[in-house]
Amino acid sequence: MTKNELNGFRRALESKLLEIGSGSSNREALVIETTSDELDRVQNANDRDYAMGNLERNSSRLGEVRDALRRIRSGEFGVCAGCEASINLKRLAAVPWASYCIACQEAVDREKTADRSEVDIAA
Ligand SMILES: [Zn+2]
């Protein structure tokens, strides 16, 4: 990987970090509004659940992005954490915080979904 490529990934990761960090609109949705209308209350609860889900997803993504930036500093960026092969540049362009090559990621995902009764297609 060239220095330019590495810098490009670092910029992409840093802007992702800012994007996730500025998720204040999600927090606003967490405020419980008092309402006498049952339908409104149900809607608010749904919004809250949705916002909570977003926050959880964002906080785990935040960790992944921070990890990737750390790997750039330590010179480990682009190396699979599983098999130590170079991660495909196209994969990194799409998912710059990826810590596994596609083969290892698939193995990890299979392991994660193995015990689940329902498959999470949203991921
Ligand atoms: Zn691998």
Image (cartoon, helix red, strand yellow):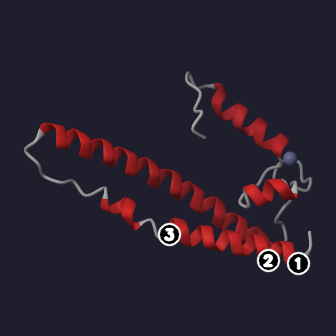
The picture places residue 43, in percent across and down from the top left corner, at 25, 42
Q: Amino acid at mark 1?
A: Lys
The picture places residue 96, in percent across and down from the top left corner, at 73, 61
Mark 3: few/some/many CA within 10 Å (<14, 14-19, 20+):
few
Q: Is residue 101 left or right of residue 30?
A: right
Front-most of 94 and 48?
A: 94
Q: Is residue 10 left or right of residue 49?
A: right
Whether 58 is drawn above or below 109: the answer is below
The residue indicated by pointer 1 is 3
Q: Residue at x 85, y 72 (%)?
A: 5
Q: Residue at x 57, y 32 (%)?
A: 120
Q: Secondary structure at mark 2?
A: helix
Q: Earlier in the sequence, mark 1 or mark 3?
A: 1
Front-most of 6 and 81?
A: 6
The residue indicated by pointer 3 is 21
Q: Secondary structure at mark 1?
A: helix
Q: Is the C-beta of the residue carrying label 1 under 8 Å from the nearest atom of ligand 1?
A: no
The image quadrant that residue 95 belongs to is bottom right
Q: Amino acid at mark 2?
A: Asn
Q: Residue at x 60, y 33 (%)?
A: 121
Q: Secondary structure at mark 3?
A: helix
The picture places residue 56, in percent across and down from the top left corner, at 47, 51
User: Real-space Cα distance between discs 3 and 2?
Assistant: 21 Å
Mark 1: few/some/many CA within 10 Å (<14, 14-19, 20+):
few
Q: Residue at x 70, y 37 (%)?
A: 109
The image quadrant that residue 111 belongs to is top right
The residue indicated by pointer 2 is 7
